[in-house]
Image (cartoon, rainbow, N blue to C red):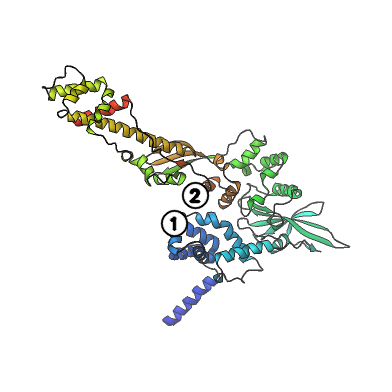
């Protein structure tokens, strides 16, 4: 039997072994993060999935690098749960590529590095990767997918990493989203009786979803155009091709734009699912290959009242709760103040129906007052003390009418502002529903911002739209209320309110 101390020691050693050998599950890292940082679960899940056992180092280093205190860090992340993913996704990829490289793995103690030092070291690593320029008398051990007559061929490399490709190409030789690599290689005569073998283009492919996630030349540069035909032929030989995804520096990858019309037609006929996105269909449409774009480019933006603030810029001169007031408590927007004598400015608006009601009321309640003239303005002037309830009714109707006009003004200003995003289908006390044409919005955003967001969102344009909005990369429309606006009231509306007001005051 083991003693209690021996059991504790064994448990401690097992826990240490698990941590040192990275045997924890993602859920364990997530729980460990949440035990140290009270941040949104979605953020903890993202960090744990990306960084594993490096999660706590990264969060601690980020907090010290950017924020004055842990409290400030936690508050900021809770207010912006997408901030780390939006701003540090590429940074994380670079750091992980650096740490996992065979020449680096196991040699770096991150505890001694700040986040900035880790970033600088990873960037230096990527810059200093050298291409070896080929190997003499190399014997290909990978399966050859196809051998061309001019000594070029495609090598099929199983798995998501190739040390050989890394050294040859001067890039990381790794894909996090694909499950296999293809390498365009050449084997040409070199001197007498020798050959020189080199790699020219690396492709990351996922055989499960049929998506190509990367196509890189040496040092992660865009491949030379002379290799495009080989790339096209590779796609045509794939068992499944469902389009292009994004992983690292996707602007340098070969894409649909790089193909000729004849190539696009062949791809479209063989792999129609590859053209299921709006962007890919628009390329076909612009080239005259299809007559109609059927892919969805519009979404319904369903916003709660509290969410509307995130899609507009609100002037500093406006109350923090102005949106909630407009949609849920409009009567608190405008508080008209009237002197007792203000009724004189509204009396000319009184129509015959309300005039009759007033005269009948006076005749019934104050028989001593002479109403034979039918001139209600003169009658009220001569008997203000007795007819105070009628004066209040007129003033109330006037105030309610102007208040309603101001409410309508504020509502229209808000609706007009939200129409920046698209057609406002609903706007009421529950929030807003807006039909947004994502493509139209993204066409007016910096292409680099869009590309980065698309990478983080696995080419999901709706996700990219929300990321760009959340990250402030789309200029939001400015909502303002003109303090010079003076509420007004027309005769018809005034008398409508006066009916209710007389009923309330004279009953």
Residue 400 position by quadrant: top left
Is residue 188 among what the camera can see?
A: yes
Residue 502 in picture, x, y percent from top left: 22, 28
Residue at image x 72%, y 59%?
169
Q: Which residue is mark 2?
A: 470
Residue 108 position by quadrant: bottom right
Residue found farthest to the top: 372
Residue found farthest to the right: 192
Q: Which residue is mark 1?
A: 78
Q: Residues within 10 Å of mark 2 (few under 14, many from 20)?
A: some
Is residue 500 among what the camera can see?
A: no
Residue 391 in picture, x, y percent from top left: 21, 29
Residue 33 in picture, x, y percent from top left: 47, 64
Q: Is residue 243 above or below residue 167?
A: above
First reached walking from the N terminus: tag 1 or tag 2: 1
Q: Is residue 342 above or below residue 448?
A: above
SS label for mark 2: helix
Residue at image x 67%, y 40%?
269
Residue 222 in picture, x, y percent from top left: 70, 52
Residue at image x 58%, y 57%?
90
Question: CA separation, marks 1 and 2?
Answer: 13 Å
Q: Is residue 333 above or below residue 152?
A: above
Q: Residue 232's mark?
A: none
Instruction: Report the side of 365 relative to 277 (left or right).
Output: left
Q: Residues within 10 Å of mark 1 (few under 14, many from 20)?
A: some
Asked whether the beta carbons under mark 1 and mark 2 sit within 8 Å of each other, the answer is no
Instruction: Report the side of 345 relative to 456 (left or right).
Output: left
Nearer to me, 492 or 348: 348
SS label for mark 1: helix
Tell me how many marks there are.
2
């Amino acid at each position: 039997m083991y003693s209690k101390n021996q059991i504790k020691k064994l448990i401690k050693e097992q826990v240490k072994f698990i941590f040192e050998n990275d045997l924890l599950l993602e859920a364990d890292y997530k729980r460990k993060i949440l035990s140290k940082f009270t941040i949104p679960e979605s953020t903890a899940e993202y960090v744990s999935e990306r960084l594993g056992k490096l999660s706590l180092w990264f969060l601690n280093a980020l907090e010290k690098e950017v924020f004055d205190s842990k409290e400030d860090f936690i508050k900021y992340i809770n207010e912006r749960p997408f901030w780390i993913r939006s701003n540090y996704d590429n940074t994380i990829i670079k750091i992980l590529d650096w740490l996992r490289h065979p020449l680096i793995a196991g040699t770096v103690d991150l505890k001694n590095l700040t986040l900035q030092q880790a970033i600088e070291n990873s960037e230096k690593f990527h810059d200093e990767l050298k291409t070896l320029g080929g190997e003499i008398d190399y014997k290909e051990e990978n399966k050859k997918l196809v051998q061309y007559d001019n000594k070029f061929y495609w090598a099929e490399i199983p798995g998501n990493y190739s040390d050989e490709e890394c050294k040859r190409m001067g890039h990381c030789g790794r894909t996090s989203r694909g499950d296999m690599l293809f390498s365009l290689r050449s084997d040409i005569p070199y001197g007498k009786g020798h050959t020189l073998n080199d790699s020219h283009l690396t492709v990351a492919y996922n055989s499960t979803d049929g998506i190509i996630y990367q196509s890189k030349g040496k040092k992660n540069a865009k491949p030379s155009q002379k290799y495009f035909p080989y790339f096209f032929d590779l796609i045509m030989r794939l068992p499944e091709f469902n389009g292009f995804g994004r992983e690292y520096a996707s602007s340098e990858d070969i894409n649909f734009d790089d193909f000729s019309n004849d190539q696009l037609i062949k791809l479209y006929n063989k792999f129609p699912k590859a053209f299921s996105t709006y962007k890919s269909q628009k390329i076909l449409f612009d080239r005259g290959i299809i007559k109609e774009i059927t892919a969805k480019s519009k979404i319904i933006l369903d916003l709660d009242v509290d969410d509307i603030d995130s899609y507009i810029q609100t002037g500093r001169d406006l109350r923090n709760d102005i949106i909630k007031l407009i949609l849920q408590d409009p009567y608190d927007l405008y508080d008209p103040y009237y002197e007792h004598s203000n009724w004189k400015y509204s009396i000319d608006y009184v129509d015959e129906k309300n005039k009759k009601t007033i005269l009948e009321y006076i005749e019934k309640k104050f028989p001593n007052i002479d109403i034979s003239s039918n001139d209600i303005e003169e009658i009220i002037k001569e008997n203000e003390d007795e007819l105070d309830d009628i004066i209040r009714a007129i003033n109330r109707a006037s105030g309610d009418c102007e208040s309603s006009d101001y409410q309508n003004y504020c509502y229209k200003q808000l609706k007009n502002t939200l129409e920046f995003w698209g057609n406002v289908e609903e706007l009421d006390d529950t929030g807003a529903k807006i039909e947004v044409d994502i493509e139209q919005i993204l066409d007016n955003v910096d292409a680099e911002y869009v590309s980065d967001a698309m990478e983080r969102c696995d080419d999901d344009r709706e996700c990219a739209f929300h990321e760009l909005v959340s990250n402030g990369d789309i200029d939001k429309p400015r909502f303002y209320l003109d303090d010079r606006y003076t509420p007004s009231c027309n005769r018809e509306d005034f008398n409508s309110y006066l009916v209710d007001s007389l009923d309330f005051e004279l009953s």
